Amino acid sequence: MFAGFLEVGLIRRARKKTLFEVRVHNLRDYARGKHRQVDDRPFGGDEGMVFMPEPVFAAVEAVRESPRTPVYLLSPQGRRFSPALAAELAAQPQVILICGRYEGVDERVVQHLVQDEISIGDYVLSGGELAAAVVIDAIGRLQEGALNDSESANQDSFEDGLLDCPHYTRSDSLGTDGVPPVLLSGDHAAIKRWRRQQSLGRTWLRRPDLLERLELSPEDQKLLSAFRAALPPDPNKPEKP
Ligand code: ADE
């Protein structure tokens, strides 16, 4: 499950430059007994299986480079993954991510081994691996030297807590139809203003929760007011008498 994204684009480059390293471990390698069993039925009887604590403790013990290495469990019960948490993890010399499967992991792993549980969103995946891949990708991008120049420039527009503006490029079949004229004007200051306004406007339309956390400058407020004023009237909103 990890082979694909580790071999593509920015993450591949960062690994090749040894800016960061990803090691994937199979829990079964740390299980004892002939069958190398890692899961069992839960006490109290319930549907499904639960990861047994021993293989998880043994695996963490084997791969941990320092007692200070934080251990996280990917689970829908976790703290929501965020840019702040990504930055926190990216700053660590080593991070261990445990991927749950089945119905979960013996709670004593959570109590005694895990620093925190991390959820990537309010939906249930069939395992923690894809969630871990999301976390690894986000950590990889934040390594010093991972982004090339154009990626860094683009990143800035996300770092400020706003959604990205729309992008257009050459199209043989569509020509410049539907492309905002300002983008063809060559006026770089006007283009920069337009992009900022689109970012503000889209964030206001789609993610007002993000906007509430920001303190907008007077210029930003003006750009947003103009964006709102230029919107077509909302058909669901009754006209004021
Ligand atoms: N495992 C299953 N669902 C998950 C989610 N939403 N986030 C993190 N880990 C998970």
Image (cartoon, helix red, strand yellow):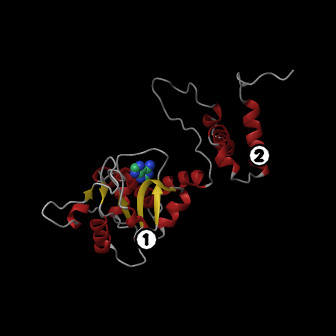
Q: Which residue is mark 1?
A: 70
Helix, strand or loop for disc 1: loop
Helix, strand or loop for disc 2: helix
Q: Would residue 128 appear left or right of 62 to someone viewing this image?
A: right
Q: Quadrant of residue 138?
A: bottom left
User: Where is 64 relative to 156, above or below?
Assistant: below
Q: Would residue 59 appear left or right of 69 to someone viewing this image?
A: left
Q: Are marks 1 and 2 in contact (CB under 8 Å)?
A: no
Ligand 1 closer than 8 Å to the CB at disc 2? Answer: no
Quadrant containing the C terminus in the rendered view: top right
User: 203 and 173: which one is in front?
Assistant: 203
Residue at left 46%, top 23%? 173
Q: Work out whether residue 231 can be spotted.
A: yes
Ranked by sequence position, the earlier of labels 1 and 2 is 1
Q: Amino acid at mark 2?
A: Gln
Q: Quadrant of residue 26?
A: bottom left
Q: Would residue 57 appear left or right of 160 to someone viewing this image?
A: left
User: 118 and 190: which one is in front?
Assistant: 118
Q: Position of residue 41 (x, y in %)?
A: 28, 54
Q: Position of residue 227 (x, y in %)?
A: 72, 36
Q: Which residue is mark 2?
A: 221
Measured in 3D between alpha carbons, the distance from the residue under mark 1 to the one under mark 2, in whole angstroms, is: 41 Å
- Dot 2: within a 10 Å radius of its alpha carbon, few (fewer than 14), some, or many (20 or more) residues? some
User: Where is 33 relative to 213, above or below?
Assistant: below
